[in-house]
Image (cartoon, coloured by chain):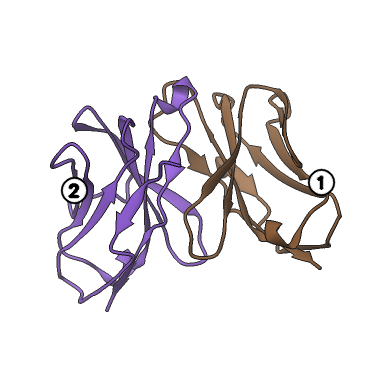
Chain colours: A brown, B purple
Amino acid sequence: QKEVEQDPGPLSVPEGAIVSLNCTYSNSAFQYFMWYRQYSRKGPELLMYTYSSGNKEDGRFTAQVDKSSKYISLFIRDSQPSDSATYLCAMTYSSASKIIFGSGTRLSIRP
Amino acid sequence: EPEVTQTPSHQVTQMGQEVILRCVPISNHLYFYWYRQILGQKVEFLVSFYNNEISEKSEIFDDQFSVERPDGSNFTLKIRSTKLEDSAMYFCASSARALGGSGELFFGEGSRLTVL
């Protein structure tokens, strides 16, 4: 079983739709959870950072962590064509010297 | 806004040649990292560096790879004898605090390495 699993997509939705992106993980030691956005041939850009379980909202983006299910989600409201990118989940634990990425979900927002 | 800068943006080299990729992390950051991404694949951890020594390295980071912080601002990744499979985008990253202490990781734009 992979440490972090993420559906690679591609996922295509119309502009204005609510997008749901998800990752599952196997290591119960993970405590810090991140979502990065990566445009083609660019570096990952940090979108959301959450600690332990619960929700965090930032503008149109909401990150959810359910540690009991080992499941994290990113919701994008009122999606825009500029949101078209690859979204990477990532996670780490308290004594770690690295973050571990999922494989990324390619998202396309149709105008 | 402070950013991680990387040079070169693209390097083409012959198999067996040495390559040095350079990074200038965000100025007040103390923790430094290299990741790589083979085209179409996931972002993979290579090495982390703190207090002038390697904190952790992956299986990919074998004896052909080395890192150095030669001065107060640069952080370099050297590949001694490149192989075809080293062709990838290499990302430098830095953080102000330890990742497990709510340190956030900021990435550069990447250096694309093509080995012929």
The location of residue A50, given as percent across then percent down, is: 62, 28
Residue at 67% x, 39% y: name it. Answer: A24
Residue A84 image-quadrant placement: bottom right
- Packing grade of label 2 (10 A; few <14, some 14-19, many >=20) is some
Q: Report the front residue among B102 and A4.
A: B102
Is label 1 in a helix, a strand or a loop? loop
Residue B81 image-quadrant placement: bottom left
Location of the C terminus of chain B by quadrant is bottom left
- The disc numbered 2 marks a residue on which chain? B
A28 to the left or right of B13: right
* Mark pair 2, 1: CA separation: 43 Å
- The disc numbered 1 marks a residue on which chain? A
Q: Which residue in the protein does label 1 denote?
A: A77
Residue at 68% x, 31% y: name it. Answer: A70
Q: In the rendered view, tell whether residue B10 sits above or below residue A89.
A: below
The location of residue A61, given as percent across then percent down, is: 73, 40
| Labels 2 and 1 within one chain | no
Q: Which residue in the protein does label 2 denote?
A: B66
The location of residue B97, given as percent across then percent down, is: 39, 25
Q: Are marks 2 and 1 in contact (CB under 8 Å)?
A: no
Tell us which disc is closer to us: 2 or 1: 1
Mark 2 residue type? Ser
Q: In the rendered view, tell whether residue B79 sits above or below residue B61.
A: below
Mark 1 residue type? Arg
Residue A10 image-quadrant placement: bottom right
Residue at 83% x, 61% y: name it. Answer: A15
Q: Report the front residue among A43 and A2.
A: A43
Q: How many marks?
A: 2
